[in-house]
Image (spheres, helix red, strand yellow):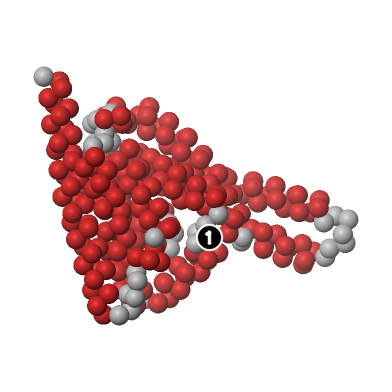
């Protein structure tokens, strides 16, 4: 029973993030409703028109990104404090200031591009099998404002979200999961929970597969800073380079070309990452002698 309780405790970070999202979004929606009512109080607007205006505001991409950013900042503070106080001393094998080596940085860049290809191809294949899932995902992207390039969206996707999500899943969740599961099982569990966190099938599968790789980076690299930087690189390439990356992919030659490029970049990234970690750790050991 004690072991089951510890396993269920691993689910707590995910539950808290869902609760926190509601605690953030409900008051913000309430405030905007009050402001909208006061603004339209003297205009004689009908109740139906008022409701439609509020629904339009609440479904606006910029508004949704703002709410997501506020939530992510709150999560960053809460889970950052939790990780630092309860887990960092046992989970951080190397200090943040010495976690990186030029080979590691290069490896993260290669992986961020290679995995864009590999996972996107896999998602397209799943979308062919389940077009309803892909349709729901496309509608979510359109309504959530993720596809827009406003300054707030860029700041959220590249800076805020990578830090908060890594602290939640590769920090707190993975840290507690390793207390009750082997490392491989713990990495798989946090990846599944990372997928569930996204609350739709296509993005959930996408995130779960990505979570496996990021969990590996955290454990092999020994610092939460490494998955944070990779996540930022990955979101950057996904935001700015996605159109050019799939040039004429509908043609068989380019379809196979980009798939091959993705696999080779992913393999090279993993190889260089392992090499970089080995070089970094060797230099750190030599300094201690």
- Closer to the camera in the image, 188 or 248: 248
Residue 159 relative to residue 192: left or right:
right
Q: In the picture, which quadrant includes the N terminus?
A: top left
Residue 18 relative to residue 29: left or right:
left
130 to 44, vertically: above or below: below
Tell me what residue is drawn at x 27 percent, y 48 percent: 108
Q: Percent position (x, y) of residue 26?
A: 62, 49
| Local crowd size for mark 1, using a 10 Å CA cut-off: few (<14), some (14–19), many (≥20) | some
Residue that carries the numbered disc 1 in the rendered image: 148
Q: In the picture, which quadrant includes the C terminus?
A: top left
- Closer to the camera in the image, 219 or 200: 219
Name the image quarter holding residue 241: bottom left
Q: Percent position (x, y) of residue 219?
A: 23, 41
Element under label 1? loop
Task: In the displayed orientation, state which residue is furthest to the bottom.
Answer: 251
Tell me what residue is drawn at x 50 percent, y 47 percent: 155
Res. 189 in view = no
Name the image quarter holding residue 243: bottom left
- Closer to the camera in the image, 215 or 99: 99
Q: Percent position (x, y) of residue 109?
A: 29, 50
């Amino acid at each position: 029973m004690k072991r089951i309780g510890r396993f269920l405790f691993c689910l707590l970070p995910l539950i808290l993030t869902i609760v926190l999202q509601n605690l953030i979004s409900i008051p913000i929606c309430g405030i905007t409703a009050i402001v909208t009512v006061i603004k339209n109080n003297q205009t004689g607007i009908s109740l139906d028109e008022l409701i439609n205006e509020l629904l339009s505001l609440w479904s606006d991409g910029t508004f949704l990104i703002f709410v997501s950013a506020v939530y992510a900042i709150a999560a960053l503070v809460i889970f950052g404090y939790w990780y630092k106080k309860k887990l960092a001393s046992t989970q951080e094998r190397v200090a943040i200031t010495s976690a990186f080596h030029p080979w590691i940085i290069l490896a993260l860049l290669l992986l961020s591009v290679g995995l864009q290809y590999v996972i996107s191809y896999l998602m397209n294949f799943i979308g062919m099998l389940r077009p309803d899932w892909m349709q729901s995902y496309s509608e979510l992207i359109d309504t959530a404002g993720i596809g827009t390039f406003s300054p707030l969206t860029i700041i959220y996707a590249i800076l805020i979200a990578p830090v908060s999500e890594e602290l939640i899943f590769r920090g707190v969740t993975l840290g507690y999961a390793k207390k009750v599961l082997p490392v491989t099982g713990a990495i798989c569990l946090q990846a599944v929970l990372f997928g569930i966190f996204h609350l739709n099938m296509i993005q959930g599968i996408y995130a779960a597969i990505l979570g496996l790789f990021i969990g590996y980076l955290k454990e092999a690299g020994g610092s939460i800073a490494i998955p944070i930087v990779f996540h930022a690189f990955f979101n950057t390439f996904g935001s700015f380079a996605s159109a050019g990356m799939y040039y004429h992919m509908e043609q068989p030659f380019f379809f196979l070309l980009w798939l091959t490029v993705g696999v080779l970049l992913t393999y090279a990234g993993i190889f260089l990452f392992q090499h970089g970690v080995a070089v970094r750790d060797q230099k750190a050991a030599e300094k201690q002698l």
